[in-house]
Structures are given as C-alpha cells and as structure tokens.
Image (cartoon, helix red, strand yellow):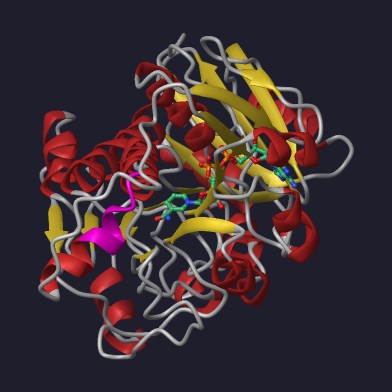
Amino acid sequence: MAQIVLFENIHPSARAVFEAAGYTDIVTHAAALPPAQLSDALRGAQVAGIRSRTHLDASLLSGNPDLRVVGCFCIGTNQVDLDAAMQRGIPVFNAPFSNTRSVAELVLGEAILLLRRIPEKNARVHLGHWDKSASGAFETRGKTLGIVGYGNIGSQISTLAESLGMRVIYHDVEAKLPLGNARPAGTLNELLEQSDVVTLHVPGGKATEKIMNADTIARMRRGSILINASRGTVVDIQALHAALKSGHLAGAALDVFPTEPKGPDEPLASPLIGMPNVILTPHIGGSTQESQENIGREVAEKLVRFLQAGTTKGAVNFPELPYLEQAGGTRILHVHRNAPGALGTLDNLMAQHGLNIISQTLQTRGQIGYVITDVEGEVNDIVMTTLRDHPITVRCDKL
Ligand code: NAI
C-alpha cells in the first residue's frame, strides 16, 4: 500500500477519497516544511500532496526515490521542478477546474454591484450620507457582457450571466463552441465596443500582457465596467486608472495585480486604492470552502487513478494515458527514454521472460515514453528487476 503524505492542510475530502479507495497509510502536515524537514517527512512516501508553499526541487525528488506521484492541490504547479519529476518518471497532477464556479460567481456579483454603483453607495452610507438617487444605477438584465477568454471560467460565466438576462458575447483566440445564446464577437475591439461589462479570463504570460491598455480601454463604451480576475499582467493599471478618473469607465473590479503583496501584512501598492468605484480583492476569486473541497477530491481522485491503474490523463508534465480497464493478471507501468526502438526493446525483454502481453498502450512526451502493459498471470521480482535495470528504463512498477 502506498504511503501518502499530505502537506499544507489539504482539505479532508482528499483523505476521504484515499480511504474509500482502500489507502489508510496517510500522514498529514498542517503546514509547508523547510527542505530538510520536508525530505524527512517524504522518506518512504510514494505519494506527496502539496499546495503552493511546498517546493519540490530536483534534489528533493532525487533524494526520495520511493516517490511515484505528486499531487498539487491547487492550480499552479511551478512550485515543483516538473522537468526533474518527468525525468524521474513521476507524474504531477493539479486541479485546473475545481474553482471555476467560485471565480464565475464573484465576477457576476461584482458586475451586479458595479452596475448599481454599490461600492460608492456603501462607502457613502458608512460616512453618514443618505443619497437615494437612481442616477447611474442599472440592472444587469438586457446588458451586454463581453467575455475575453472563453475557457473554463469564461464559458461558466457565460451560462450564469444568461440566466440573469444578460446578452453574452465573447472573444477567444481559439474557435470555441458558444454556450446557450452567447455568440463570438469577432475581434477584441468589436467586443469592447459592444459591451457594458467586460470581464477578462485569459491566461497570463507575454501573449496577454497588457491586452487592456490605453488603446483598448478607449475602445470600451463610455460608462462601461472592466473586471479582471485572471492575471494581473493583463491590464495596464495606469491606463485603467486614467480611464476611471476621466469617467470613461464607470467602475472596475480587480482580483489580481501586476505585483501582489507577499503576505497578509503587506499592503497592496496601486493607484486604484481609495477609488470609490473600484472593487479590490486579494486574489480570492477561486478561494471558497467549496473550491477547497472540490480540489481535495479532484486531485485525490487523479492520484488514486494513477496508483490503481497507471492513468496519467490530466498530468501536467507527463505523457497522458487515459483510464484503461486492466486486461490481464498484472499491469506493468514502464517509463523509458524516448528513443527509437524503446518499445521493441521492452517487448523483447518481456518475451525473453515469458510474459504474454494481452494489451499495451504507449504515449510519448518530450524525452520520455510511458507504456502500460497488461500481461497474463503474475510477474515475479526477478523479471521486475531486469526491467528496472535495463538502460532504457527510467522507472518501472507493477500494479
Ligand atoms: P482556460 O485555459 O480554461 O481559458 C483561457 C482561455 O483564454 C482559453 O480559451 C484560451 O484560448 C483563451 N485565450 C488565450 N489567449 C487569449 C487572448 N489573447 N485573447 C482571448 N482569448 C485568449 O483558463 P481558465 O481556467 O478559464 O482560467 C482563466 C484565467 O483565470 C487564468 O489566467 C487563470 O490563471 C485565472 N484564474 C484566477 C483565479 C483567481 O483566483 N482569481 C482562480 C482560477 C483561475
């Protein structure tokens, strides 16, 4: 049975999934550990479950040869040396979808609040004012929502917004199936020119850096609203500040920033601080109790699938093989250097040891290949040692 070590207070839903699958050797740690303690805590573990503060670098991975698989119970995976893990035959999983709904709900809530000018009105009441004016306050019904990036989150917002009676248009660099009555806007500028509320759901990185800048913000309708819960680099903050000050934009909501504070006591530095028509939140778009529970379940299920069937679908650093029903007495998981003839070499080795292959699936990615082979009967330790010791082999396990 696999020893499973979970760090950083991973939601108990993960443990429940492991236990339901028959794994009871589970150790949990409430926090991330410094490297030396981390290595001790990982000794003998086959499964490591971490969140964003545990760093698994190449030396930690090589110092813990029993480790077979890593689960990042979060979205990001750059706390793990993914290449070093791949080179050691260790797939890494994460939870790309579990907080989609939480982000979508926050964005729609912000759209409603900003269209009604609630942030300003709330601040005024706290300051002792009682202005009952309807000026500048609108319903969402019938307004146009422009979604930039129609992926997991963008498309979820699309269906929720339609249920509020909004008209939805979107822009994506890839062709995307429109959900409900949503329709593609053609270009980004066409979307900006037609939308009452623009919400951004693109990835970060060079390709999307400052796609909302002075020029594109100028294309937005006068009195419209900009929401960014994607990545801080996507919006030119100075340009947004200028557009809010001039009244070109009626409001904005930002959950992400070009530079974010490193800890709870560090204040955000932004020209938008103090603007009454701007909602600022500390990158909590996906942070809800439900999303933590979903993440616990989603990643633990992927880890169990890998442990029980060798499935690597959804791994971020590994050849992806889907769930395959086991066809024989023993399943062999073989990771090898991706070189011509590797599969033939493996099959010859198996044949030399009298193994009869019933089913076999190979997938390669970069420098490695991954083969799931189901063979008749039992496979003894001598054969496993021969397979493991062969120069083409990176890693070999049997289930
Ligand atoms: P996704 O990968 O499912 O969707 C992104 C979409 O953007 C894809 O359809 C892609 O084709 C499209 N795209 C890429 N470049 C584009 C461009 N230049 N113009 C238009 N479309 C473009 O990603 P998902 O899961 O929907 O996440 C979206 C963003 O939200 C990511 O940046 C992610 O990091 C962020 N996020 C923020 C959270 C928060 O707490 N605020 C929580 C979860 C995700």
Q: Which residue is located at x 10 percent, y 44 percent? A: 24
Q: Which residue is located at x 70 percent, y 30 percent? A: 363
Check if residue 221 falls in the magenta segment: no
Q: Which residue is located at x 55 percent, y 38 percent? A: 196
**Does residue 369 appear in this view?**
no
Ligand 1 visible in quadrant: top right
120 relative to 193, above or below: below
Q: Position of residue 139 (x, y in %)?
A: 35, 32
Q: Position of residue 214 (x, y in %)?
A: 75, 65
Q: Quadrant of the N terminus?
A: top left
Q: Nearer the viewer, residue 315 or 174?
A: 174
Residue 201 occupies which quadrant of the picture? top right
Q: Which residue is located at x 24 percent, y 44 percent? A: 296
Q: Position of residue 370 (x, y in %)?
A: 64, 36
Check if residue 119 falls in the magenta segment: yes
Q: Nearer the viewer, residue 282 or 40?
A: 282
Q: Nearer the viewer, residue 221 or 56?
A: 221
Compared across the picture, whether 237 is left or right of 205 comes to left
Compared across the picture, whether 190 is left or right of 99 comes to right
103 relative to 50, above or below: above
How many numbered marks, from 0 up?
A: 0
Classified by dominant secondary structure, the portion drawn in magenta counts as helix
Q: Position of residue 88 (x, y in %)?
A: 58, 59
Compared across the picture, whether 133 is left or right of 26 comes to right
Q: Quadrant of the C terminus?
A: top left
**Does residue 14 appear in this view?**
yes
Residue 195 occupies which quadrant of the picture? top right
Q: In the image, which residues are magenta?
A: 116-121
Can you name the residue that lies furthest to the right here?
Answer: 340
